[in-house]
Image (cartoon, rainbow, N blue to C red):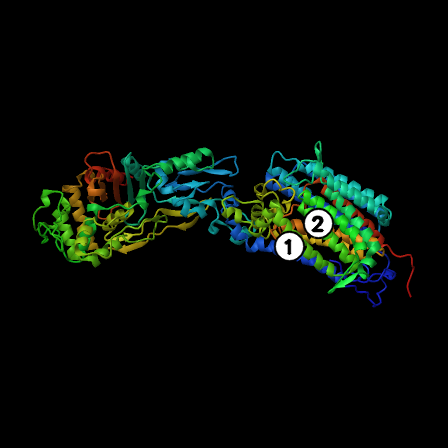
Amino acid sequence: MATPSAVARPAPRRRPVRTRRNTELALVLAAVLVAVLGYIEVGVNMDGTVPSGAGGYGAALGVLALLAHGVVRWKAPYADPLLLPIAILLNGVGLVVIYRLDRANTRSEAAPTQLLWSTLGVALFIAVVLFLRDHKRLQRYAYIGALVALVLLALPVLFPPVYGSRIWITIGPLSFQPGEFAKILLAVFFAAYLAVHRDALALTGRRIWRVRLPVGRVLAPVLLIWAAFVGVLVLETDLGTSLLFFGLFVVMLYVATARSGWIAIGLLLAAVGAVGVGWLSPHVHGRVTDWLDPLGSIAAGRGANQIAQSLFAFAWGGLLGTGLGNGHSILIGFAAKSDFILATIGEELGLTGLIALFLLYALLVSRGFRTGIALTDPFGRLLAIGLAAIVGIQVFVVAGGVLDLIPLTGMTLPFIAQGGSSVVTNWVIVALLVRMSDVARRPLPVPEES
Amino acid sequence: MARGGRTAPPAGAPQGAAGISTTGRRAGTILLIVALAAQATRVQVFQADRLNHNAANQRLTIERYSQPRGNILVGAETVTGSAPTGGRYDYERTYTDGPLYAPVTGYSSQTYGNTQLEGTEDDVLSGTDPRLAGWALWDAIARKQSPGGDVYTTIDRAAQQAAMKGLGNQKGAVAAIEPATGRILALASTPSYDPGSFAGSATADQQAWDKLRADTNQPLLNRALRQIYPPGSTFKVVTAAASLAEGVVTDIGAPTGAPYPYIMPGTTTPLVNDTSACNRAGLSLDAAMVYSCNSVLGYLGVQVGLEKMVSTAEAFGFNDAKLDIPVRAARSNFDTAMNPSQVALSSIGQFDTAATPLVMAMVAAGVANGGTVMYPQLVDRLTRSDGTSVQVMHPATYGQAVSPQVAAQVRQLMTDVVEKGTGTNARIRGATVGGKTGTAQQGVDNTGTPYAWFISWAAPAGSTGVPPVAVAVVIADSNATDVTGGGLAAPIARSVMQAVLGG
């Protein structure tokens, strides 16, 4: 798959370097504007008036956006100008939809909390951009990070299960999902390990048919760590995160070794694992049944399940949607703000809004990939691609689940779904990508060619 | 998406490492997003209609009750309304004089659906009918909901009240028609019910519904439209019309040649009469109608023959399984394959002959309208909420049952029944009334309470125009000791006709 190009490149360094910071500023302001207009639309559609908090909401989001932009302008002037605006737009739209869902249920007050978490997320973003001068420093803490991640993941076993899954740590009024933070640490670990051992992985070992299997000595630690993660997650019945970690592992292995055989093996392992877990766990078995026949529970007289309600919401949205605030998302049930938030977007913004959203995510992921390609250090390349892959896989798993494309596994839509740990984690991912893209796009000190 | 460019790792990077090509990576991302977009399109476009109409999907119902429903009107007066509920469904149907108009309006219940006019005109009332929209295509795209339209009925308030009051506590039904147009003036069925009692989705609504469903008197049954009864002697009007039309009888005052006793063809059984006045040979058609003689009309029916009896009955509305006014009426029956003795019995409204009160009203109206039966219609016009019409009713001919000359002779027969026969209870001062009584036996060995029938029409005295009202009354169950059409049903018909003539 490697394509070492022998073609001479058209000397991009001859042009004056454009940092694109003003483009980013314009996009950031546009993103804030879109979110504020969405907020106003909810108020107009639900009450007939502009909501009283529109000014405050717009100001809060605007200040966060401008602070983040200012820090990027100051500390990472060559960063990719699309990453931050996309994050602001996704986060803003998420806040609007959560606010709208709050309105459907008088007892719900999730939007202010989400704004608080978003603030924390942006604060961490700023901190990373400010203080992480070189992403390669992360490589040193890879093993400690993996250990911390494992502990974080194991902790929820000590806490009571929520909706059948032990993935939450609840301290007083605060609750968070340690698995969310763990995924960054795991990506760092994989990147660091694979960057060191990629040659051994790619070039040694026995060849079976067209796939070259690496020697056990090299692969074993990775497999061990990975198995520990998945084991813990299976114990917690958090299928979504297991799937995410597995997908991340396969993608990074593939990127590190450039051997497409890993994808095949990964898919095979995933299939075997899915069938096995589906067989053994009644929880998962039920989800597979619902996936294959989402309307089956209606025929059986048990009423519409969540997937059916989700499909009803999407269908009602049609091409253009009902408009924010005009849908019937209350019918979706308790997970409307987290796992099933996409159904409300599909109902109220329609297929048009949904595909726009998918394109935003695709843009974010492809910008992450691009950052990875542009970087020269193996660790950075792997990390950037891994982080982007986390976002991509997570979107696919959650959107595919609520759209009945794949079985539902229960994950949060990055930046949009309610959930503090998720928002904070995704802001850190974007911060790392911004940091790395600054390095990737920074002009080399070589003054000129030829 | 990223444009091409930095496909190759810069010099100095380890070759072969992280060498996944841009195209490959992009393909991965694109593949996932295409899969998601394709599935979203499948659900939101191709499966949308099926999902929207799934019974477990509450959205259509919520949308339906999100705005006040259009109204059903009697004259200029609304007999329905909408009240805000404060629940998941914003509005709930209300009824003024619910039991009085229930046989006309039917019900619109959040839980149990829509019937009668509430059902057939639901698109207009709920605002989904495309004719209500100002800019249909744009409104469909913008999902603008039209306000509900109104349904103006042909019902005459006074006639409806007279019909329901006349029926009172008895089990029965009334159908009244304007003969020249087919406009339905009254449609009554007792016992009635209050459609407002179960319009909502609360426990009380469910209890009211369960109680109505459990009631052995079937209050939810619209007896005027949906129930068929043996018409008994009222059917003799059809037989008399067929006899005159086929030339079996040419002079209603001349002897018919009917024997007495009349032994039904192919049997040894005589067709017996209820009155001794009938028990002689050679009675005229007029006398036979005045005394309601089974032997004479049975004989005449056989002389007319099965084929002509069937075609005449069908011209009046029998054997029509799709009689929509626009609410569908049950099919009234006159058998098409019978032996002569069965034809004799059928000709006096027995054997398998059975009719809805609506069709018997069509018989009386057809006779009154010079033999032309008009299609019965319950809706005068449909309007938008601002009052502009989207559809106006035009009178439509159902069929030419008999010639105007024959119709005039049958009218004379019916007038004589009221003047000097079994129908004297229907006489109205200052009006010409024609009618026919009927008392149909029922139950095993006729042990059940008989059905008391009366069909009639009335015109102001001296009028040469088409009588303004024709009516059919059936009492299916009464506490009265002497159950006859003349005794029980005729007074109700009279009060309905009076109500129309007086207005």
| Secondary structure beneath label 1 | helix
The residue furthest top is A172
Q: Quadrant of the C terminus of chain A?
A: bottom right
**Label number found at residue A129:** none
Residue furthest bottom in the image: A7
> Residue B441: percent from the left, percent from the top?
20, 43
Disc 2 residue type (three-letter): Leu
The residue under label 2 is A244
In the image: residue B366, left or right of residue A130:
left
| Three-letter code for the amino acid on which mark 1 is drawn | Leu
Disc 1 target residue? B36
Q: Is B110 placed left or right of B428 in the picture?
A: right
Q: Nearer the viewer, residue B111 or B56?
A: B56
* Residue located 68% across and 57% down the image: A268
Instruction: Classify residue B396 as left or right of residue B277.
Output: right
Front-lying residue, A260 or A224: A224
Image coords of residue A423 (percent x, y)? 73, 43
Q: Is residue B96 at all visible to an observer of this figure? A: no
